[in-house]
Amino acid sequence: MPTLIAHIKSIEGYTTTYRKAWLEKQNVVEDVYDNWERSYHDLLRLLQVMQKFLPGMVVEKETLLMPPQGGQPVESFIMFHRLFWSFRPCIDGFQYCKPIIHVNGTWLYSKYRVTLFVAVAKDGNNKILLIAFAIVESESVRAWQFFLRNLKRHGTPQHGLCLILDRHQLIKSVYSRHDSGWTTQNSVHVFCRHIA
């Protein structure tokens, strides 16, 4: 913001407040990229287009049926809940990587407070390959189950894999569940903070 304020002063000779500069920046971003609600609403349509033009892209989504709120005479609507995706080159490239997968999650800081899950591996040249992604509501048992189940089904169906987890108890408990796809017969899990 200080750069924007300085730019306005150099052009207009006027020093604006931080708040005014921030609000105007938000308006410009909305003019260029559309607003948050519209972008969020268009997410599923964008994914359909990507699947059409990126053959083999995997998309798994979960939605919720939301009842009308506030006594308004509006019909129920479907709301985005969770999303998993992976690109075919990433899935195909994993077969040339070390059989080690690191999964982790991070919070996204924006209007919609959601969590991004990522699965990565290293190739023979020690370069990181992104395998799969998910956007979920939070780090919960069901969210991790959604991600790990789809990761095993679509991205890493091989046996004999090592899954590196942080010491988050939710991930450990999901790994141990029979419906996650990850079992002690087809994989092993270890704890680590960073892929090495």
Image (cartoon, rainbow, N blue to C red):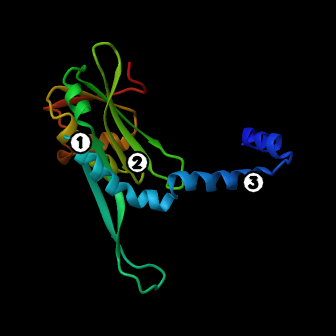
Task: Kindly state the secondary structure of the residue where label 2 is placed.
Answer: loop
From the top left corner, tell me how far across and down residue 165 is, in percent. Answer: 35, 32
Taking the image as shown, residue 31 lies to the left or right of residue 181, namely right
Name the residue tied to disc 2: 139
Report the mark closest to the observer, 2 or 3: 3
- In the figure, 100 relative to 51: above or below? above
Taking the image as shown, residue 149 lies to the left or right of residue 195, namely left
From the top left corner, tell me how far across and down residue 77 is, in percent. Answer: 35, 73
Pick the residue in front: 2 or 180.
Answer: 2
Please state, as top left, top right, bottom left or bottom right, where the C terminus lies in the image.
top left
Pick the residue in front: 10 or 162.
Answer: 10
The quadrant where residue 170 appears: top left
Name the residue tied to disc 1: 57
Q: Alpha carbon of mark 2 to alpha carbon of mark 3: how far? A: 33 Å
Report the mark closest to the observer, 1 or 2: 1
Specify the amino acid type for callout 1: Met
Name the residue tied to disc 3: 19
Specify the amino acid type for callout 2: Glu
Q: Alpha carbon of mark 1 to alpha carbon of mark 2: how far? A: 25 Å
User: Dot 1, how many residues are within 10 Å of its Cα: few (below 14), some (14-19), or many (20+)?
Assistant: some
Specify the amino acid type for callout 3: Arg
N-terminal of the pair, mark 1 or mark 2, is 1
**At 29% across and 44% down in the image, what residue appears?**
85
**At 40% across and 39% down in the image, what residue appears?**
168
